[in-house]
Image: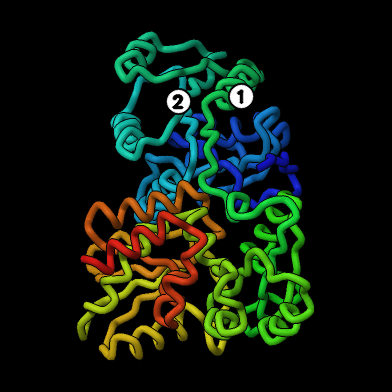
Amino acid sequence: MKSVPKTNLSVAKSERKHIAVIGRRNVGKSSLVNAFLGQDLCIVSEVAGTTTDPVTKSMELLPYGPIVLVDTAGIDDEGELGEKRISKTIKMIASADFAIVVLDGRERLMPKEWELFNYLSKISLPFVIAVNKIEYGVNPVLLSELKLINATHFEISCDENVGIDILKSKVIRMLPQEDGPPLIADLVNQGDVVVLVVPIDLGAPKGRLILPQVQTIREALDEDTIVILAKDKELRSVLYTLKNPPDLVITDSQAIMRVAADVPDNVKLTTFSILMARHKGDLPFFIKALKTIDSLNDGDKILIAEACTHHEQADDIGRVKIPRWLKLHTKKNLEFTINSGNDFPDNISEFKLIVHCGGCMLTRHAMQFRIKQAALIGVPVVNYGVLISYMHGAIPRALLPFNEAVAEWNKSKLN
């Protein structure tokens, strides 16, 4: 399996490493982001609290590659709005892959900063400390305090552009390199024929394919496979015209049963959402959650979690179809809560099951953090594709390309 370097244009925002720049108000977070970028993207002001919402900017951090820098509100913001801004900052930190904590070199550590370091340690997020404003001198007490937490720190001046390049070099060395499992690179070989079934329905964006489809096409091409795209109603004709059966068929989850009926049993079959379940989430953990479905009772609360925001469609997958299918499958009167966007609710302990989208708009770290949150309090999580395939009778067939998922399915069925 060869590795093809990804260019700045070919890497989706959710596939880039996210670096959160965090700290108290007026320590120079926005100035540091501007210094990294080499341009004045973020507003810099002496007025505390200028940054209210997270500001993101994609860039090429050479020689590492494409990243996303996130400027955040101060962790010491005040008032009712300030608390909401802090909450957004904390959630942004939880979804980041790395953090740069900015301190004012003239001061000593404040209680909010001690709390921040404890939180970063709790969630195991790697970080580096940038001691800013050294043109005014550095407080020796601050340096003594930094020794206590045994964290790497660099002395910089954003205003005078001192130490920025050294800080960049350290960030590059410390950034996580692991991208998690591929989508299909380990499932195919050079010359394989891969058929992608892409229905065009109300949920399909006009003039575009959805991100998992685009990423799968690109990864398949990177592996020198032959990629064939077809709508579900044309699949039978495509299979008939092929001299030999394809090596892999991947379909949209909602078409799984129609597609399974047309694809020979000896051909590997799965869904885009199951690919995403492995790439961004935890496929065996999702499989384990399936046994919860048949034990649901009247009144049980189900969280439908979507990472992206979009206008509700007439037959929306998350808001309409999945609730309808779950009620039909369980024959129970279930209660559904819909949560969209980057915010993950704090009250997940009250739900019996979390049904999550594929997470294509989240970083892998963000998706993993959500799964770990749920696992710690014993709430099962399953993603759209795994759930849909199960309720439509396509499990275990759609899992056959993945040995670890099949093993978990067999274990769950025995328990």
Q: Residue at x 51, y 36 (%)?
A: 21
- From the viewer's perspective, is the residue at label 2 or at label 1 nearer? 1
- Secondary element under disc 2, as helix, strand or loop, is strand
Circle on res. 103: 2
Q: In this picture, is 1 found above or below 245?
A: above
Total numbered labels placed on residues in the image:
2
Circle on res. 228: none
Query: What's the residue type where badge 1 is placed?
Result: Lys
Coloring applied to the structure: rainbow
Q: Residue at x 34, y 71 (%)?
A: 303
Q: In this picture, is 107 found above or below 304?
A: above
The front one of 400 and 333 is: 400
Q: Position of residue 389 (x, y in %)?
A: 46, 76
Quarter of the image with the N terminus is top right
Q: Position of residue 235 (x, y in %)?
A: 70, 81
Q: Residue furthest top?
A: 140
Residue density around tag 1, few if under 14, some if 14–19, many if 20 or more, within 10 Å: some
**Could you tell which of marks 2 and 1 lies nearer the N-terminus?**
2
Q: Quadrant of residue 135?
A: top right
Quarter of the image with the C terminus is bottom left
Q: Residue at x 52, y 38 (%)?
A: 178
Q: In this picture, is 56 found above or below 290?
A: above
Q: CA distance from mark 2 to mark 1?
A: 16 Å
Is residue 47 visible from the viewing direction of this image? no
Q: Position of residue 142 (x, y in %)?
A: 37, 15
Q: In this picture, is 246 found above or below 83?
A: below
Q: Which residue is mark 1?
A: 168
Query: What's the residue type where badge 2 is placed?
Result: Leu
Is residue 296 visible from the viewing direction of this image? yes
**Left or right placement of residue 179 versus residue 122 in this view:** right
